[in-house]
Image (cartoon, rainbow, N blue to C red):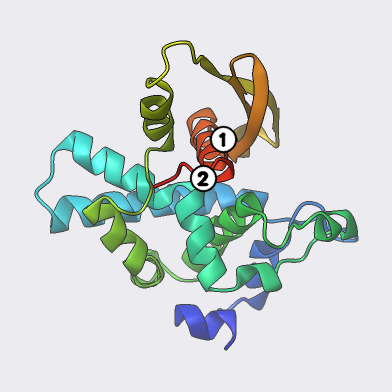
C-alpha cells in the first residue's frame, strides 16, 4: 500500500507529499520538510485539543497531559512506524548509514510534516479525519494512560530504595532550528554517565534517557 492509501487521502499536489518526506540531510534538494513540520505540529495540537474538549469531559490539566502524550515524539514516531514512513523518507547517505530511517526524531518529524502537507492540500475538516484515523490507537491508549509511561518517576522510585543513589539529567547538546530543536540528554548516575536520551523537548529527552537506562538494566516493568 502507498502512503496515500494508508492515510486514505490522495494529494492533489503530489509535490507536497514529496517535500513532507524530504529530510534536511538529503542532498540536491534545497527544499526540506522543516517548515511543514512546524505547521503540522500546530495542526495536530489543535485537532487533538478540539477532539478531547468535545468528546470527553476532562479537566484542563488532564486534557493537557493526554494531548502531550498523543503528540509527543514517541507517540508520533510509533504512528509513523506503523505507516512505514521510514521506508519513504528522502535522506542523505550519512543519515541512512547511521540508522536515520528508524530514528524516532526523523519519523516523528516526517509524520508532523505529512499532516502539515495534508492540511495545505485540503482543509481542516479533511485533515481532522486523517489525524483521528491514523492516531486512533494512540488516542485510545493515551486516554487509558497506557501510551506513554512516566519513566523518570519509575526510575526515581527504583533509586530511592538506596538513599546513596544520585541521578542527574544533563543537556549534552541541542540541534536544529529554533522551532524544531532536538535535545540530547545524558543521565548521570552516581557521577557516571549511564545512558542517553533524545527528545523534541528537554523533558522528552529526560524521559527517553530514563527509559533507556531501565531497559538496559532490565528494571522496566
Tag of residue 209: 1
Task: Tell me the residue at 67%/24% (across/down).
Answer: 193
Eye-nearest disc, 2 or 1: 2
Residue for point 55% across, 61% down: 111
Which badge, 2 or 1, comes first in the chain's sequence?
1
Residue 205 vertical placement versus 66 (above, below): above
Q: Is residue 8 left or right of residue 173?
A: left
- Image position of 211 with respect to 171: above or below: below
Q: Nearer the viewer, residue 182 or 149?
A: 149
Tell me: 186 left or right of 137.
Answer: right
Image location of residue 182, percent across then percent down: 64, 37
- Residue 177 is left or right of residue 130, and the answer is right
Question: How far separated are the C-alphas under marks 2 and 1?
Answer: 14 Å
Q: Which residue occupies 51% across, 14% down?
A: 166
Quadrant (top left, top right, bottom left, bottom right) of the N terminus: bottom right
Asked whether disc 2 touches disc 1, contact meaning CB atoms under 8 Å apart, the reply is: no
Quadrant hosting residue 200: top right
> Residue 214: x percent and y percent?
51, 39
Q: Eyeballing the image, is 130 above or below 187? A: below
Categorize mark 1 by other alpha carbons within 10 Å: few (<14), some (14-19), many (20+).
many
The residue lying at 66 percent from left, 67 percent from top is: 86
Q: Position of residue 134 (x, y in %)?
A: 41, 70
Please say whether residue 183 is visible from this viewpoint. no
- Compared to 38, does 96 lie above or below? below
Which residue extends farthest left? 57
Residue 218: give its label.
2
Residue 157, which numbered label?
none
Amino acid at each position: 500500500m502507498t502512503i496515500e492509501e494508508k492515510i486514505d487521502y490522495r494529494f492533489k499536489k503530489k509535490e507536497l507529499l514529496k517535500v513532507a518526506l524530504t529530510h534536511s540531510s538529503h542532498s540536491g534538494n534545497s527544499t526540506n520538510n522543516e517548515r511543514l513540520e512546524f505547521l503540522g505540529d500546530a495542526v495536530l495540537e489543535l485537532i487533538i485539543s478540539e477532539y478531547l474538549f468535545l468528546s470527553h469531559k476532562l479537566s484542563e490539566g488532564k486534557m493537557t497531559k493526554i494531548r502531550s502524550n498523543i503528540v509527543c515524539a514517541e507517540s508520533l514516531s510509533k504512528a509513523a512506524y506503523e505507516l512505514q514512513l521510514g521506508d519513504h523518507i528522502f535522506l542523505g547517505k550519512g543519515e541512512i548509514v547511521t540508522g536515520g530511517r528508524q530514528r524516532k526524531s526523523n519519523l516523528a518529524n516526517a509524520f508532523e510534516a505529512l499532516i502539515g502537507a495534508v492540511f495545505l492540500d485540503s482543509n481542516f475538516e479533511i485533515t481532522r479525519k486523517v489525524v483521528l484515523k491514523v492516531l486512533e490507537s494512540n488516542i485510545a491508549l493515551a486516554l487509558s494512560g497506557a501510551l506513554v509511561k512516566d519513566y523518570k518517576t519509575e526510575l526515581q522510585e527504583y533509586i530511592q530504595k538506596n538513599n546513596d543513589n544520585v541521578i542527574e539529567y544533563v543537556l549534552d547538546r541541542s540541534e536544529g532550528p529554533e522551532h524544531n530543536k532536538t535535545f540530547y540528554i545524558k543521565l548521570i548516575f552516581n557521577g557516571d554517565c549511564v545512558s542517553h536520551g533524545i527528545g523534541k523537548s528537554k523533558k522528552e529527552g529526560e524521559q527517553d534517557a530514563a527509559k533507556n537506562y531501565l531497559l538496559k538494566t532490565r528494571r522496566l516493568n
